[in-house]
Image: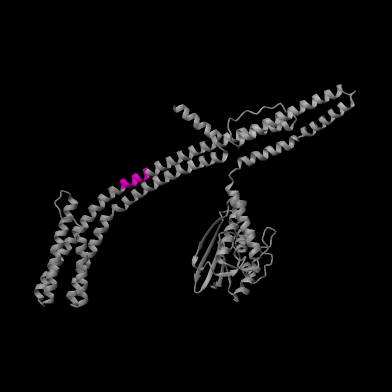
Amino acid sequence: MKRQKTKALETRWNNASMQMKLTISFTFTLVIILVMNIFMYMNVNTLTARVEAVYASNVNLNELSEALAKVQEATKNYLDTKSSDALNAYYRADQDYRNLLSDLNTGTTNNQLEIMEKNIRAQSETYLETVYETIQAKRGRNVEKYKTHYDDATVIYQDIQNCIYSLNNEQFKSNSMTYTLLLSSLRYMEVISTIILISIGCINLIMIFMLTRSMTKPLMKLSIAANEVAAGNFDVEITDTGTSDEIGVVSKAFQKMVASIQTYILEIRNSMERESELKQKELTMTNRMREAELMTLQAQINPHFLFNTLNAGAQLAMMEGADKTTEFIENMADFFRYNIKKMNQDATIEEEVRLVDNYIYILNVRFTGEIHYSKDVDESILDVKIPSMILQPIVENAVNYGIRNIDWEGHIELNVYCKDGFAYISIWDNGAGMTQEKIYQILHGELKQVDLKSNSNGIGMGNVIERLKLYTGREDVMEIKSEGLGKGTEFIIKVPIHR
């Protein structure tokens, strides 16, 4: 029964399309990785929470010590000033300290740390009572009594602080051991997670290798057979792939095509033999000739065309399910549509930022993702009006003259923010940088060749600056910052906020 189920699954897999096989394989991989990441996330969060809770007791004791000091300080201030503010400060400090005392242990226990907590609480209650009597004596102007009570309270205060300090040290020692154990567990979890991820990666590589091999091996055989046919050898055999996917369909179609060609050649030969035998019968010979011509026309299949067509079909089959190609074409269409539609119109910051996103995407497809791009945009000013085709030429300039030929990893950052009633757009790169002389030339339109290479869109930096000045009626529309060659460049556009 189990063997039958396995065979049925194998048959369904062989009959599935390449798109389905790739989808199932990558979905399975993603699910495994997702489950593993969730498992790691939950365990790491659990351990992190336990680590954070380790030293909570020390923090509480520090807060208790600070609250006790505030009670002592408030008492002294009241004794010195006898003001209502000082009295209110004492009551607040007293209440805060009592709230913290409520967290200490009061029950019977054999744990040394809990016993120390119980002693601190008992001493604190005595201290608070003594301080209260001191305050009451002060309010009753009984100088001798409040001095005696204050001295007693001070002694108890010192004892409590010493106890808190001792308890804090003991708690710290205990917590340090717990922290060490948790840290070891965290490192162990890290090692286990790394091993599991590496194992998953190896399994995925094996799966991908097996899947691609099952697709490319029949294609290689088909390519060899196509070369044989192109060389005029029609006695080739294509091993049946045993699948019903696109590769299996192409292989079977190729087999039928080769068999048809062989049949046509054989029929031509027979026709020519019959033609030789029936020369004396003109009508019959004419008919045979017409048949031969027809057969010849049908048999004139260019082997090179067949080979190239099959190779193209193989490549198309391998690339089936090309979502990235679709995305690339859509970005290209959006980019050129924007260029045509918005060249002589106003635009919003949102539209210009979207154009930059499309442009960076297209460049990363061309240059295999070597351009690292990030952005931080204040969405509240995305509807601010600016001239069209302003940001893309600056980004293009940053790519061509900033990060294109540097020896380190290139980054471009786009920031949009609001300040003092103006919208600021910053385009920064960590590329080749500029001299102050070149910055001056760009800002004053003296460097005419900037951004006018053949691979540019033709809108130079001078054009951008002039259009911004005309649009805003201001001169301070552009600022260029660079610390020198090799230290990157930042272009900052400043426009009034008009919606």
Residue occupying image coordinates x 76% and y 35%: 302
Q: Is residue 353 visible?
A: yes
Q: Main secondary structure of the magenta part?
A: helix
Q: Is residue 184 magenta?
A: yes
Task: Find residue 226 and report its image quarter.
Answer: top right
Q: Is residue 231 found left or right of 28 in the rendered image?
A: right
User: Relative to 274, does residue 77 appear above or below in the rendering?
Assistant: below
Closer to us: 359 or 264: 264
Q: Is residue 481 magenta?
A: no
Q: Is residue 455 found left or right of 277 in the rendered image?
A: left
Q: Which residues are magenta?
A: 180-188
Could you say where residue 195 lies in the image, as x and y percent from the top left? 43, 40
Q: Is residue 44 found left or right of 136 in the rendered image?
A: right
Q: Quadrant of the C terminus?
A: bottom right
Q: Quadrant of the N terminus?
A: top left
User: Relative to 251, does residue 178 appear above or below in the rendering?
Assistant: below
Could you say where residue 169 lies in the image, as x and y percent from the top left? 24, 54
Residue occupying image coordinates x 77% and y 32%: 299
Give the color scheme: rainbow, by chain, secondary structure or one colour: one colour
Task: Find residue 103 and report its image quarter.
Answer: bottom left
Could you say where residue 64 lies in the image, as x and y percent from the top left? 23, 61
Residue occupying image coordinates x 20% and y 64%: 97
